[in-house]
Image: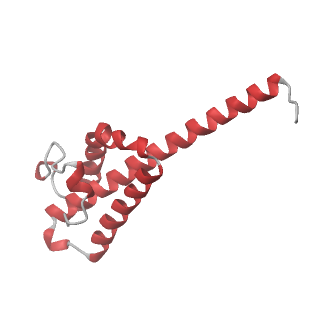
């Protein structure tokens, strides 16, 4: 059996903790980014009916699939969807306003989609 000095083991544990925290932060950022893109495209889909495209539908489907995969890999991320849905919506609305040129008043102030609706493949 290999014998290592205690200091070496402690440094290795500290590095592992740092790495795990870094991975968790990255996964949270990715989840929120994908939720923002999903909500933005749902807004565009809802409020620009005449501009709906297969591309938007594909983006919505892709974001839903990637969010699902993130949650399968890391179920502990699920509560973050609930906690950060309104923050993601605020960012999505801002992006939708910029991309569509529609006035802010067109979009609901609060997220009009429950998580179940946003993540439901039948919703679009």
Kindly give the residue lying farthest to the right in the view shown.
2
The answer to whether residue 105 is left or right of residue 3 is left
Quadrant location of the N terminus?
top right
Where does residue 123 sit, x and y in percent of width and height? 19, 63
Tell me which residue sits at (24%, 60%) in the image: 120
Tell me which residue sits at (28%, 50%) in the image: 92
Where does residue 16 sit, x and y in percent of width and height? 66, 36
Q: Is residue 1 above or below residue 114?
A: above
The answer to whether residue 96 is left or right of residue 21 is left
Q: Quadrant of residue 13?
A: top right
Q: How is the image coloured?
A: secondary structure
Kindly give the residue lying farthest to the front in the view shown.
1
Where does residue 69 sit, x and y in percent of width and height? 43, 57
Q: Is residue 109 above or below residue 119?
A: above
Where does residue 102 sit, x and y in percent of width and height? 17, 57
In front of the other: 112 or 44: 112
């Amino acid at each position: 059996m290999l014998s290592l000095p205690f200091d070496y083991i402690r440094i290795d544990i500290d590095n592992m903790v740092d790495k795990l925290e870094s991975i968790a932060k990255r996964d949270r950022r990715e989840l929120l980014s994908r939720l923002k893109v999903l909500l933005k495209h749902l807004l565009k889909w809802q409020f620009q009916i005449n501009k709906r495209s297969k591309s938007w539908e594909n983006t919505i489907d892709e974001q839903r699939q990637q969010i699902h995969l993130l949650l399968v890999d890391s179920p502990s991320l699920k509560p973050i969807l609930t906690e950060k849905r309104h923050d993601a919506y605020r960012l999505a609305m801002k992006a939708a306003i910029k991309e569509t040129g529609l006035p802010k008043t067109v979009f609901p102030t609060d997220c009009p989609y429950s998580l179940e609706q946003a993540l439901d493949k039948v919703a679009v």
